[in-house]
Image (cartoon, helix red, strand yellow):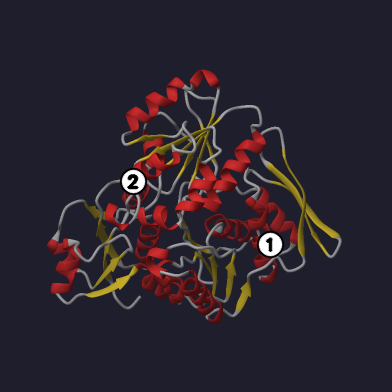
Amino acid sequence: MNMKSFYFLGIGGVSMSALAVMLKNFGCFVQGSDETKGRGTDILDEYKIKVDYSFNPKAIENADVIVFSSAIKDSDERFIYAKKLNKKIISRGELLGQISSHFEKVIAISGSHGKTTTTAMIANILLVAGKNPTLHLGGYKCDDGKNFILGDKEYFITEACEYHDNFLFLRPYLSIITNIEKEHLDYFKTFSNEIKSFEQFKKNSQIVIDNFENILIKDIKHNEKGELLFSMWENNKKIFDLNLHLYEEINAQNCVYAYLATKKLGISDSYIKLGLESFYGVCTRFEKKSSPYFNTVFCDYAHHPTEIEKAISTALKIFKDRPLVTIFQPHTFSRTKFLYNEFISVFKDVEYPLFYKTYSARECQSDGMSSAEFCENLNKINQNSRYFDDYSSLFNYLLTLKDLNPVLLFLGAGNLPDLLHKKHFTT
């Protein structure tokens, strides 16, 4: 990198913290600010990257480049101060594009759903095949809790997020589009605008995988642990059987994309099978939790109705004779408003649909619909729906259901997983 000193606004974010570690690995001086501690800041502490939890003007003055995430608002005092000093200011997506340009082959995985898991799968396949990939991940791997791999300069594997057109800063050697649905309409405004951005992403890529080609998935089932089993076929010939350490059936599709990508990179079937079967997933992607109070608990990052429906379907299929309790924390007010009908459809038949206060991220309540408002509307259809605005009252209500031996399914991309981890549930 030409610039040597970076200051990150929102450095604790899952993508930002990974990029910060990569820059330090390149020999740059890196520090930043955030509002609270979390998994990202714990990793930064491990790599001796300083995080400010209050305004530190001197650090901004000394930085060559200021990097901001989409969660940072124009009204942020650090952002305002950096502009006043005429500092070079770049977005997270722009920095990701700059970093990726230093690698021979950029492998970028995009789509509305499945991109984090598919990205991590591809990295694991390349690792077991003896390659040394660099990975930038929008989640934390279950095997080591990290959101990155510091590898060599041949392969750069990254999750490619469409929000604010961040993925258009990338110039992939190979790109994957897992699927496209209405998402981030607070930015795109219309679905047609979103489609146009994905089309441009394709044009920026040398090789594009956006379908299953000739691959078929057969014999999907779950073993006694609930883990996923299936076989992959091509032109009426079985490629191999797979026994995953994952639960959701959507992972069969993720495996197909990972297979197609790594085959195009010259990886053999035996290494692909080993890479997929030795993959333990990404945290909060239908991740099994343990608890001293409940027998069966899963935590899933799902925050879009399609993802939620798949998580619920998986739980119902594996645990057929037990009541299901969903605990959903909506992510942003605008998404709840834009996809209101889809959310209603997903939760209307759940036995115990519970809702936690909205994770506002970059928004305020006037941008859409709150979790409380949504729950009030759902209650007209499903009278078991309940809303909670603090963790203690939620947990105390869950205890009243304990004798039912329920399956608890926590859903959402907000801070509820951190609360679970720190309090009554552990991984």
Viewer-proximal residue among 53 and 112: 112
The quadrant the N terminus occupies is bottom left
Residue at screen point 35% across, 46% down: 358
- Side (left or right) of 51 relative to 145: left
Looking at the image, the residue that sits furthest to the right is 236
Place of residue 242 in the rendered image (x, y in percent of width and height, measured from the top left):
73, 49
Viewer-proximal residue among 174 and 396: 396
Circle 1: residue type: Tyr
Residue at screen point 55% across, 22% down: 405
Place of residue 50 in the rendered image (x, y in percent of width and height, measured from the top left):
25, 54
Viewer-proximal residue among 384 and 270: 384
Name which quarter of the figure residue 357 lies in. Answer: top left
Dot 1: within a 10 Å radius of its alpha carbon, few (fewer than 14), some, or many (20 or more) residues? many
Place of residue 264 in the rendered image (x, y in percent of width and height, measured from the top left):
68, 71
Dot 2: within a 10 Å radius of its alpha carbon, few (fewer than 14), some, or many (20 or more) residues? some
Q: Which residue is mark 1?
A: 259
Disc 1 to disc 2, C-alpha distance: 33 Å
Q: Is residue 265 above or below residue 410?
A: below
Q: Is residue 235 visible?
A: yes
Q: Which residue is mark 2?
A: 38
- Side (left or right) of 63 relative to 352: left
Q: Is residue 285 visible?
A: no
Place of residue 288 in the rendered image (x, y in percent of width and height, measured from the top left):
54, 37
Secondary structure under tag 1 reads helix
Circle 2: residue type: Gly
Residue at screen point 40% across, 55% down: 337
N-terminal-most mark, 1 or 2? 2
Q: Is residue 401 above or below residue 2?
A: above
Looking at the image, the residue that sits furthest to the front is 380
Q: Is residue 33 above or below residue 372?
A: below
Q: Which disc is residue 220 wearing?
A: none
Q: How many marks?
A: 2
